[in-house]
Image: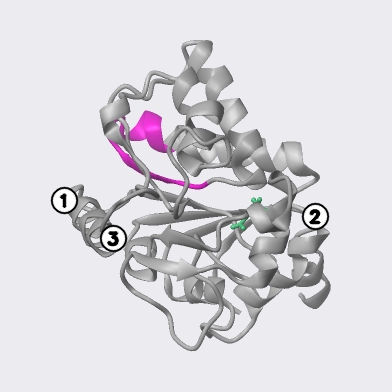
């Protein structure tokens, strides 16, 4: 098993608060930091804490730059299930981050390959991410790097796994409405982050977290590559850590 700092929190709220504290510490320490941000149910609670602390004057995003992990291909920024919309609703609209300092892949890009190349170039121009927040899929995906035969280094267009479409269909009227493709930051940009904060909640993540922390490094569980990163903090609740804790 790899050495990884692990915080085992009681429940989703405690996990969210801990994750938010780690992000806030980064911003207080380096007000102009580059944050790698994630969407989904996992970070929602952490974003609420960050919004509260910002509104209370304890925290400022004035000089923060952000890049998001991924975006559905084909969804407009104002589509209520796009990840740009998620970020506006859950964080950006409620804190003092400058809109021009936030970037989410453009799901409507006329030339998606070019969008991917420009996304990587942009991350490089920022000097890579200082703190990358990650959730994890039940199948072990990070960003939308789905299980496959090989890790993919660059930002790329990905065909979503059936299990991902099914998991995310809870946000759409029907599974048919879930986009079949996304643009995802690749393993290079994720692993290029100076620090990674992996967050997970719930028993349905226990297997993915176990394979990520204790399993072999394999593209069949993309999260497992985090074992090669020297600075990963895992913040999870007891349910998500149940298999790791049972094995240790
Ligand atoms: P979730 O998604 O936070 O909605 O569970 C995480 C992911 O699929 O990466």
Q: Quadrant of ligand 1?
A: bottom right
Residue wearing tag 1: 125
Q: Which residues are magenta?
A: 26-38
| Residue 226 rendering spot, x and y as whole percentages | 49, 70
Q: Residue at x 47, y 11 (%)?
A: 57
- Regarding residue 7, the answer to whether it shows in the image is no
**In the foreground, 149 or 48:** 149
Q: Label 3, secondary structure: give it.
A: helix
Residues under numbered marks 3 and 2 in contact, where contact means CB atoms less than 8 Å apart: no
Q: Label 2, secondary structure: give it.
A: loop
Where, by quadrant of the figure, is residue 211 drawn? bottom right
Residues under numbered marks 1 and 2 in contact, where contact means CB atoms less than 8 Å apart: no
How many marks the image carries: the answer is 3
Mark 1 CB within 8 Å of ligand 1? no
**In the foreground, 49 or 159:** 159
- Say whether disc 1 or disc 2 marks the residue closer to the N-terminus: 1
Q: Residues within 10 Å of mark 2 (few under 14, many from 20)?
A: many
- Regarding residue 27, the answer to whether it shows in the image is yes
């Amino acid at each position: 098993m790899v050495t990884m700092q692990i915080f085992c929190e009681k429940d989703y709220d405690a996990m969210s608060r801990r994750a938010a504290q780690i992000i806030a510490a980064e911003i207080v320490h380096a007000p102009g930091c580059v944050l790698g941000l994630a969407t989904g149910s996992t970070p929602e609670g952490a974003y609420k804490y960050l919004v509260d602390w910002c509104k209370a004057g304890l925290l400022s995003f004035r000089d923060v730059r952000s890049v998001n992990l991924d975006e559905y291909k084909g969804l407009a920024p104002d589509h209520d299930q796009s990840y740009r919309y998620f970020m506006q609703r859950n964080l950006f609209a409620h804190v003092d981050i400058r809109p021009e300092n936030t970037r989410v892949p453009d799901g409507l890009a006329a030339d998606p390959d070019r969008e991917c190349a420009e996304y990587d170039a942009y991350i490089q121009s920022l000097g890579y991410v200082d703190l990358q927040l990650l959730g994890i899929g039940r199948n072990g995906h990070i960003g939308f790097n789905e299980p496959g035969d090989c890790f993919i280094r660059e930002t790329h267009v990905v065909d979503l796994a059936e299990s991902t479409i099914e998991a995310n269909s809870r946000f759409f009227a029907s599974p048919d409405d879930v986009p079949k493709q996304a643009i995802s930051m690749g393993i290079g940009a994720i692993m290029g982050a100076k620090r990674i904060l992996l967050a997970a909640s719930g028993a349905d993540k226990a297997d993915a977290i176990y394979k990520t922390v204790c399993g072999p490094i394999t593209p069949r569980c993309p999260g497992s590559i985090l074992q090669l990163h020297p600075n990963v903090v895992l913040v999870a609740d007891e349910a998500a850590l149940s298999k790791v804790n049972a094995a240790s």
